[in-house]
Amino acid sequence: MKGLSLTLQPPINASITLVAQWTEPLITSTNVTPNDVAAAVDYVNANHGVFTLVIDTDVSAAPQVLNLGGVKLLIIGLGEPREIRLNTQGILFIVGSNQQKGVNLTLEKNITFVGLTNGHHGAITNNNGHLVYVYLDGIFTMLEGAKVTGNTAHVSAVHIHEGIFVMQGGEIIENVSTGIGSSEVGGLRLGSNSSATLIGGRIARNNVILGDLVVGSTANLTLSGSAKIGTVAIASRPQDKCFHNNCFGMDKKRQCD
């Protein structure tokens, strides 16, 4: 690292590789303590730029809103998988703003968003909303080692409305959507004028009415690479029609026969 000076005792007379590791979140402020998700989001919403929140233990959090245009928040788990667990009914992360564009949330390695399911992780009720909701040019990205799971509600675990979703890795798995007769039901829901690029990761094993992935009539979906989808529903038709993952080939977009 530039400007770093080390004195080693005893001296090492061979080439070695040094690996840097963080011991506390990189967002540092007198108002932000380690692993405090709410304080970190407040700080990011007040300061333009790119920020990394490092979580080094499992934490619980109330619903958050990331809404400063042009800001990017990356969340990573330190050393091993870490969980951010929703501790009350609501949307764990709303990403977007009515006035400002380009709000960006990225889940990196070893971080899991966990919703509410009655009887799990001490929850005494199911959730009443999405786990992540992205709207009005907000951007939600999942990388390898990220996960969205454990949400039981009448709607999808992740909903993109006039926003952007990029999945390079990670998983949206083991969520439950209980709604009946609603196109909102799924693991991931692509709503009006939204777009999704799935080049890796997996959306599967969600207990849903329609499909692991639900695509609205004006949504744009691109599947490629190693992305794995359990079932897909096209929600724009009078009868929601489900498709299996083998309907989509490498770098192709088409429907089942």
Image: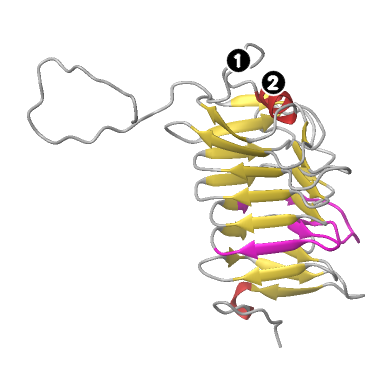
User: From the viewer's perspective, is residue 192 above or below residue 101?
Assistant: below
User: Left of 204 or right of it: where is 192?
Assistant: right
Give the residue at x 72% y 56%: 164
Where is residue 159? Give x, y as percent: 78, 52
Distance in Å between CA atoms under marks 2 and 1: 7 Å
Q: Is residue 218 visible?
A: yes
Q: What is the crowding at mark 2: few (fewer than 14 residues within 10 Å), some, or many (at least 20)?
A: some
Mark 1: which amino acid? Thr
* Quadrant hosting residue 204: bottom right
Dividing the image into 4 quarters, which one contains the N terminus? top left
* Quadrant hosting residue 31: top right
Count of numbered labels shown in the rendering: 2
Q: Is residue 208 visible?
A: no
Give the residue at x 74% y 50%: 158
Is residue 245 one of those drawn in magenta?
no
Mark 2: which amino acid? Ala
Where is residue 84? Give x, y as percent: 63, 31
Is 167 in front, or is 90? 167
Numbered circle sitting on residue 33: 1
Is 39 in front, or is 244? 39
Dividing the image into 4 quarters, which one contains the C terminus? bottom right
Name the residue that disc number 2 marks: 39
Q: Residue furthest bottom?
A: 257
User: From the viewer's perspective, is residue 209 above or below residue 14?
Assistant: below
Helix, strand or loop under label 2? helix
Where is residue 234? Give x, y as percent: 80, 72
Is 130 in front, or is 54? 54
Q: Residue furthest top?
A: 30
Query: Which span is picked out in magenta?
Result: 172-199
Where is residue 147? Give x, y as percent: 58, 45
Q: What is the crowding at mark 1: few (fewer than 14 residues within 10 Å), some, or many (at least 20)?
A: some
Are the residues tagged 2 and 1 within 8 Å (C-beta)?
yes
